[in-house]
Amino acid sequence: MDSSNNGPPPPATKIGGEDNFPVEVILASWTDRFVAWLIDFIIVSIGLGVLFALLAIPFWFSYYSNGMALAHNNLEPFHYLLSSLAFFGYWTYFEHTSGQSIGKRLLNIKTTDMSGSRVDTKTAAIESFGKSFLLPLDVILGWLFTNNKRQRIFNKISNTLVIKLRSKDEQTENIRYRKD
């Protein structure tokens, strides 16, 4: 396509692009984010269930009839901490490496910094902390104070967004070719 076209120019593919046109960023809906979280929660919970079952094998064969209940009661705080750390590690890893956990990948959404770039490990850790340890508080305060960009509080603190990705067809239809 020739640059003498009188129609509106297509948006640049990233902020600060060659043409310096604003980019439309589609914020992921709270529903998509919740469904992605739920998928991730189920996946990690299944993995943790298997891990905890394996760790409990020695108690299955205990000579004490209440050995399993006693072990469960004594390990309850450890269970919460280990589960939260597993979720924290899962989300930090995926948010840093690709911006997409398995749930986000299935729903075609992604975590980015405010300019649409991949987040670093520290930013991913800050962003993941809220949903791993303080999710209800993180979401409720986010709805109250940062809803214009659909950010949880820890998204706001880490300067991250969750965006809806364009389908492959939408990504290629607005490409403009220019000769030098």
Image (spheres, rainbow, N blue to C red):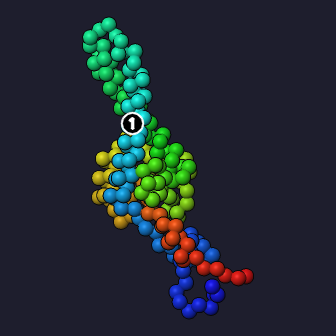
- Determine the image quadrant of residue 32: bottom left
Q: Residue furthest front?
A: 169
Q: Residue furthest right?
A: 180
Report the front residue among 144 and 161: 161
Q: Secondary structure at mark 1?
A: helix
91 with respect to 38 (left or right): right
- Can you say which quadrant of the picture contains the C terminus? bottom right
Q: Is residue 49 above or below residue 16?
A: above
Residue 27 seen in render: yes
At x 53% / y 89%, what residue is drawn? 7
In this picture, is 35 found above or below 17?
above
Residue 166 is situated, as x and y percent measured from the top left of the image, at 48, 67
Q: Nearer the viewer, residue 121 or 62?
A: 62
Residue 137 in the image, given as x and y percentages of width and height: 31, 47
Which residue was labeled with disc 1?
46
Residue lying at 41% horizontally and 30% vertically, measured from the top left: 50
Q: Give x and y (percent) for residue 10.
A: 54, 80
Name the residue located 44 percent from the left edge and 63 percent from the top edge.
164
The amino acid type of the residue labelled 1 equals: Ile
Residue ID at (37%, 55%)? 33
- Mark 1 neighbour class, 10 Å CA radius: few under 14, some 14 to 19, many 20 or more: few
Q: Quadrant of the N terminus?
A: bottom right
Q: Quadrant of residue 2?
A: bottom right
**125 over 48 or under it: above or below:** below
Where is residue 77? Give x, y as percent.
34, 27
Q: Is residue 157 visible?
A: no
